[in-house]
Image (cartoon, helix red, strand yellow):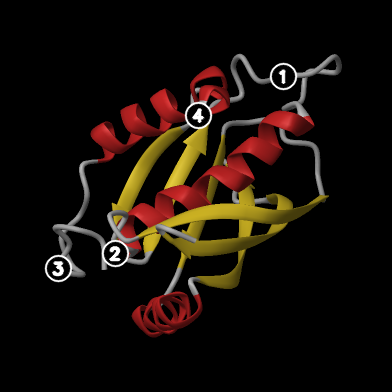
Amino acid sequence: MAAGSDNSTPFDTAKMTANTRSQVSMAEHCKISVDEAEFGRVKLSMPKDGNTNHIGTIYAGALYTLAEIPGGTLFSTTFDSSRYYPIIKEQNIRFRRPATTDITAEMTMTADEAAEIAAVADRDGKADYDRIVELIDTEGTVVAISTNSYQMRTFGT
């Protein structure tokens, strides 16, 4: 469980946004914000403004970034970062529609899933897990779906 979390207390999203932007320069460049965060669930957003391509839709690289960032944010709400750290092993994104508005991304993990991942990491020094994230525009349309493969490692491995 994340340090200081009791599974129901919301996290300070302004602080999480600042931390994310300071640790990942692309998150700063893309103006990604953590809008909601609690144990096992995060919701992030990215504005269209400043993230467009040559045809006026959101640049694919910006969408890719938004699809990857929730993995670290979710990790910080769900696991003890003094014992574990995450890495991304693979990301596959399918672009479904042009993104023409601000975009949100939500990622979740149940307490049982988290416990199982932590148990494997404690036993083996690492644990692989996948998360799927949908990127959704302001009209509720899914503009992209990303399957992300992560690995949680214990410090010292």
Q: Amino acid at mark 1?
A: Thr
Classify the position of the N terminus by image quarter.
Answer: bottom left
User: Closer to us: mark 3 or mark 1?
Assistant: 3
Which numbered disc, 2 or 4, marks the residue that appears first in the sequence?
A: 4
Q: Nearer the viewer, residue 75 or 31?
A: 75
Q: Nearer the viewer, mark 2 or mark 4?
A: 4
Q: Quadrant of residue 77?
A: bottom left
Q: Secondary structure at mark 1?
A: loop
In this rendering, which labeled residue sits more in front, label 3 or label 4? Answer: 4
Residue to which mark 3 is pinned: 6
Q: CA distance from mark 2 to mark 4?
A: 22 Å
Mark 3 surroundings: few (<14), some (14-19) or many (≥20) residues within 10 A: few
Can residue 156 be seen from the camera position used here?
Answer: yes
**Residue beneath disc 1:** 52
Q: Compute the Cα span from label 3 to label 1.
A: 39 Å
Numbered badge on residue 24:
4
**Upstream in the sequence, badge 2 or badge 3?**
3
Foreground disc of the pair 2, 1: 2
Q: CA distance from mark 3 to mark 4?
A: 27 Å
Mark 2–mark 3 CB contact (< 8 Å)? yes
Between 69 and 99, which is closer to the camera in this rendering? 69
Q: Earlier in the sequence, mark 1 or mark 4?
A: 4
**Mark 4 is on which residue type?**
Val
| Left or right relative to 25: residue 122 | left
> Label 1 to label 4, Cα distance in Å?
19 Å
Residue type for callout 2:
Phe
